[in-house]
Amino acid sequence: MDIFKLGDKILALLEVVFGFWNNQVSLVFSMLGESPVDFKNGDPWTIIETINPVFVAVGSSLVVLFFVIGFCSESVDIKEEMRFEVILRMLIKLALAEWFVANNITIMKAIFETVGNLVNALTNGTTSNLSINSTQADTIKNLGFGESLIMLILSALIAIIVIICGFFLIYNVYFRFLKLLIIVPLGALAFSTMGGNRAVSHTVVSYVKYFLSVCFEAVTMALAIIVCNSFINAGLPTFTGSYADWAKTLIYLCELTFTIALTVGSVKGAQSLTSKVFGL
């Protein structure tokens, strides 16, 4: 009887779930190629630009303070240190620190655009659609009642896992934007330490490293999704050759779900991987 044929219902459920995942991946690709300047129609960035002058004013004041601290800590004998090249070096450091404090947002916007263009180049034309293999689909349609009932339970579990993974995928991308928007105004304070000695200027080095790791995290995320999609589209592993067709389908769905979870894990650890690769 048709009531005992669950294959069409299983396929319908899997198509809905995989369609949801495909939409999430497409949304992630578009967001990773988007600059924080344009995120949410630019409303969050407008707030950042509004409050940034406060940080610039504080940073400009700190430039002079850190310059004096650096000068006092490095000068053992003022008469000996007051050479022309020493004065010139200190003035250059002071000028650079003040320029970076005043133009930190302009520099960051250029980096955002560069990273966005790189992500768009990687994801342009990339096949990211997840679908049921035609062979596996035919197997599901022809399952008996007992086998199809097991498959239906498994499909329901897969649906829950994929939906959760899809939301976690979006969460990680949103969290990246949040981190960038929060640390942008702090750049004025970090760049003000450039005018100090080595101990003080270490702050700006740490800031730049973290900022670059968060920016290029988008590239690592995109690469992780592309590579994991290739795992999914590679088909069944060779060891399944001796299994029954319904068992191959079970293994196929389990491997597919595992790879989706692996994708989310790779995206979540993208910043740490980026920092290690570039030594940031």
Image (tube, rainbow, N blue to C red):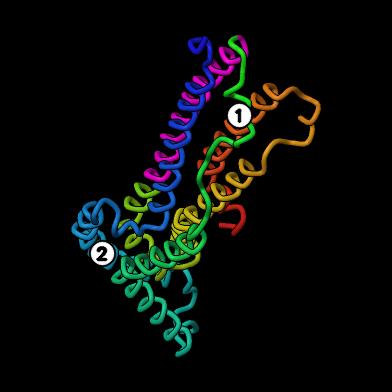
Find the distance from the CA under tag 1 to the CA under tag 2: 64 Å
Q: For the view shown, which residue lies furthest in the front direction?
A: 1
Q: Residue at x 53, y 38 (%)?
A: 131
For the residue marked with disc 2, what is the amino acid? Val
Residue 42 position within the rendered picture, expressed as x and y whole percent measured from the top left: 24, 56
Give the crowd class for mark 1: few <14, some 14-19, many >=20 residues within 10 Å.
some
Residue 152 position within the rendered picture, expressed as x and y whole percent measured from the top left: 53, 17
Q: Is residue 143 magenta?
A: no
SS for callout 2: helix
Q: For the view shown, which residue lies furthest in the left direction?
A: 50
Q: Residue at x 41, y 42 (%)?
A: 23
Give the crowd class for mark 2: few <14, some 14-19, many >=20 residues within 10 Å.
many
**Residue 173's image quarter?**
top left
Q: Is residue 149 above or below residue 111?
A: above
Q: Which residue is mark 1?
A: 138
Asked whether, in this view, residue 199 is left or right of residue 51, the answer is right
Residue 252 position within the rendered picture, expressed as x and y whole percent measured from the top left: 65, 30
The magenta-colored residue range is: 146-175
Q: Which mark is residue 166?
A: none
Q: Which residue is mark 2?
A: 56
Q: Is residue 121 above or below residue 251?
A: below
